[in-house]
Image (spheres, rainbow, N blue to C red):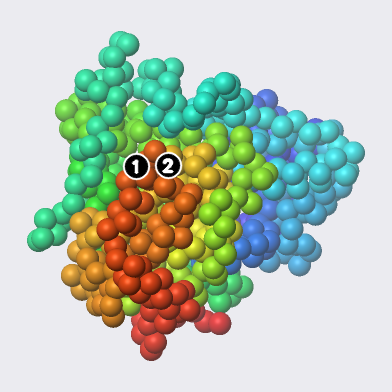
Amino acid sequence: MSTTAFESRLVSGEVRNVIVVLGDQLNRTSAAFDGFDPHRDVVWMAEVAEESTKVWVSKPRITVFLSAMRHFASELRADGLTVDYRLMGDTQNTGALGTELISAIQRHSPDGVVLVEPGEWQVRATLRAAVESTGSTLDERVDRHFLCSTDEFASHAEGRRSLLMESFYRAQRRKHNILMDGDAPAGGAWNFDSENRGAFPAAGPGLVPEPAQFVPDDITREVIGLVEGRFGGHPGSLEHFAWPVSRTDALTALHNFVAERLAEFGRWQDAMWTHEPWLYHSLVSSALNLKLLDPREVVAAVEAAWRAGLVPIEAAEGYIRQVIGWREYVRGIYWMKMPDYGDGNALDATEPLPDWYWTGETDLACLRDAIGQTLEHGYAHHIQRLMVTGLYAQLLGVNPRQVHEWYLAVYVDAVEWVELPNVLGMSQYADGGFMASKPYVATGKYIDRMSNHCGSCRFRPDRRVGEDACPFTTLYWDFLSRHEERFARHPRMALQVKNLGRISESDRVEIAERAAAIRRGEVGPIVGWAPSELRLEN
Ligand code: FAD
């Protein structure tokens, strides 16, 4: 891409609008382009180092963002738009979004700046302040990518005693006529959740169709070189980089999923299997979050497959619930609760995140597998995030901010509006139950039921004390002990807490001692085990 210099055809002083396009706003249907005049408007995009360093962002995530931005800029230019694109390597690049925007405004002296709602509270604050400091005017537009605007979500929330995802989801289906037969839910029920919890038989998942893989093109290869050179010490590997980074790739990924794997998605949504990173998941979250895909086209493709009889209802409904339900719901919560949401720590968790979250060097087989694929691909599916890495951090009592920073860093689909509520609210219960009605806590037996990890693990999920006790199981009982008072009368936790009563006093002491040893790092990390692709360089 010829982005080495800004080749404006516009003479300074004649620019009407500077149109800001952020790294996760790569859609031509964006409101940013409403009324765009190629003779008077200029698109502004910037690669800034702070986006890769404010948390320790993994190499796959940096590459996805930069490559997708460069592809998008190059498509805009091919369509005749003028793009002022600040490359990371430009000598004058200050590395910060705010100062870069100020310098672009000074360069172009526009009448105004157009910005679509950013996906991160702090980015929005920074950009608003940058525009204000120049005396220019800001035209901030609604992000039409989402089916539910932040205002609409706020009205939905108003006056409700509890904000359940399910009622939001049903309202969305009705309003947008998705998977509906008249006034009734198609397929005879709103929710087929109970059919979405299958575990594979002992023989495993069998042959799972391979997802679409995207061989890096020239643009991506150039970005990979840049990332290795500049962020070589960051976590993760680029050896197998194959993510969609353009709209064409993203559509291929979507259609491949619908044709090859959607039919089995519903049944195996929660299942895990060693060395099977993808299973029947769609792998389109990064494409959706970059806005290379529109959620409407995603749900339309899925609904059409069901109406054509190609996939069962539990697959189509289960999938659509994630996209128009959970995805929109967490965004609504994020904007309702920011900027304080990130400070939540309802369970007073203060432990540091174990170092091996950044390397995968642990002898817990499930965590080794989930973290290993996370570093190798920038991906883990929902149950791995919630019930393996997230659960362990919660049981250990890790400070939620550190957990949040890890999730924001390592996944290719991580953008704060979706990451933060999932981590703080759903996985760590740090918002005190605003989002999840109870903490998602379980012993190692849950992981044993849903995967084959425990078969090859040195720990036993059914043991809570002793040398071979599964740390998840020990920490689960320790969690209930530590929070006994808090949850003893909680309507959805009381039963779990009551079970503590069946444990002898001596076992409770042993549980507390072993939990303390786990926190001291005496159980968990592997000494001397480090496959090369997981070894960090610094
Ligand atoms: P599939 O399993 O195929 O699901 C389909 C789509 O549904 C996803 O692409 C996604 O867009 C949407 N979706 C599913 N679950 C959720 C959810 N809980 N919240 C929002 N959207 C959902 N998702 C992100 O996009 N970015 C994140 O940073 C992120 N962080 C998470 C952190 C934790 C602790 C947890 C528990 C979940 C997180 N999720 C996040 C949600 C979910 O895990 C991912 O969207 C999903 O694993 C992406 O893989 P996929 O595209 O193969 O999804």
Which residue is the site of mark 1?
A: 254
- Residue 384 sits in quarter: bottom left
The local crowd at label 1, few if under 14, some if 14 to 19, many if 20 or more residues have their Cα within 10 Å, is: many
When the figure is inspected, residue 461 is found, relative to residue 326, above or below; the finding is below
Q: Nearer the viewer, residue 154 or 255?
A: 154
User: At 35% from the left edge and 33% from the top edge, which residue is drawn?
Assistant: 321
When the figure is inspected, residue 390 is found, relative to residue 234, above or below; the finding is above
Question: Total marks drawn?
Answer: 2
* Secondary element at tag 1: helix
The amino acid marked with disc number 2 is His
Can residue 41 be seen here? The reply is: no
Q: Position of residue 381 (x, y in %)?
A: 35, 53
Residue lying farthest top? 182
Can residue 103 be seen here? The reply is: yes
Q: Position of residue 330 (x, y in %)?
A: 50, 39
Q: Position of residue 183 (x, y in %)?
A: 32, 11
Q: Earlier in the sequence, mark 1 or mark 2?
A: 1
Where is the C terminus found, in terms of image quarters?
Answer: bottom right
Where is the N terminus found, in terms of image quarters?
Answer: bottom right
The amino acid marked with disc number 1 is Leu
- Residue 316 sits in quarter: top left
